Image (cartoon, grey):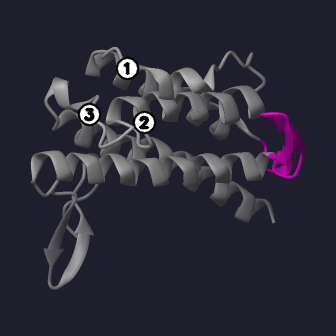
């Protein structure tokens, strides 16, 4: 069982650090600064808000909830932010949060995956907390990609077709099968 648990930890860490973060970063970097805070309506989020939200979520669930660091998150502020922040600052916050979370995940003993932690007033297992963060990050990365495609009208070039099979071509990924 510990081989499966180790694989879960390793894959979760790799997926956050080397697949999702680079895609969110590369997409956000395609937008002009003034477009980072565009939102289609008040019920939707901007790319800037999503980057803040992802950093807060990763830090709260993994760095604090699993890793034991103090939880200083003010979640609503991630969505209420309207004053533009520079892209470099947004990406630095997100990168630090993901790197800190990757360090926590990488340091975990697989035997702790079924231990209970408290996050947002709920009791969840360590495995549930990690799974939540990966799923949540993936969902919002998809929203970021969609907004960037919508605003730029461009394909982001994250995949290329090789012999009729889509292959990953985003930063950090092999461009050949």
User: What secondary structure is marked by label 1?
Assistant: loop
Instruction: Answer whether labels 1 and 3 touch (C-beta < 8 Å).
Output: no
Name the residue carrying label 1.
Answer: 82
**What crowding class fits label 2: few (fewer than 14 Cα within 10 Å), some (14-19), or many (20 or more)?**
many
Left or right? Give the position of 90 relative to 129: left
* In front: label 2 or label 1: 1
Name the quadrant containing residue 8.
Answer: bottom right
Left or right? Give the position of 76 relative to 110: left
Is any atom of residue 96 visible in this view? no
Residue at 19 percent across and 52 percent down: it is 150
Q: Position of residue 38 (x, y in %)?
A: 26, 34
Task: Locate the C terminus by quadrant.
Answer: bottom left
What is the spatial separation of the Cα atoms under label 1 and label 3, in whole angstroms?
Answer: 10 Å
Q: Position of residue 163 (x, y in %)?
A: 14, 84
Q: Which residue is situated farthest in the front direction here? A: 42
Magenta stretch containing residue 172, yes or no? no
Residue at 45 percent across and 48 percent down: it is 140
Residue at 49 percent across and 45 percent down: it is 16
* In front: label 3 or label 2: 3
Q: Nearer the viewer, residue 1 or 19?
A: 19
Q: Report the span colored magenta.
A: 109-125
Name the residue carrying label 3.
Answer: 38
Residue at 81 percent across and 50 percent down: it is 113
Considering only vertical position in the picture, is 77 above or below 98? Answer: above
């Amino acid at each position: 069982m510990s081989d499966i648990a180790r694989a879960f930890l390793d894959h979760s860490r790799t997926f956050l650090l080397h697949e999702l973060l680079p895609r969110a970063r590369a997409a956000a970097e395609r937008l002009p600064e003034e477009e980072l805070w565009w939102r289609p309506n008040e019920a939707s989020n901007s790319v800037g808000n999503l980057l803040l939200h992802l950093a807060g979520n990763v830090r709260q669930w993994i760095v604090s909830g699993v890793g034991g660091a103090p939880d200083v998150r003010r979640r609503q502020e991630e969505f209420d932010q309207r004053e533009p922040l520079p892209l470099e600052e947004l990406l630095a916050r997100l990168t630090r949060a993901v790197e800190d979370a990757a360090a926590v995940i990488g340091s975990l003993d697989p035997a702790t995956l079924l231990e209970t932690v408290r996050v947002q007033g709920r009791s969840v297992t360590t495995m549930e907390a990690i799974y939540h963060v990966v799923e949540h990050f993936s969902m919002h990365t998809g929203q970021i990609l969609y907004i960037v495609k919508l605003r730029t009208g461009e394909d982001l070039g994250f995949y290329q077709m090789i012999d009729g099979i889509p292959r990953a071509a985003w930063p950090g990924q092999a461009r050949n099968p």
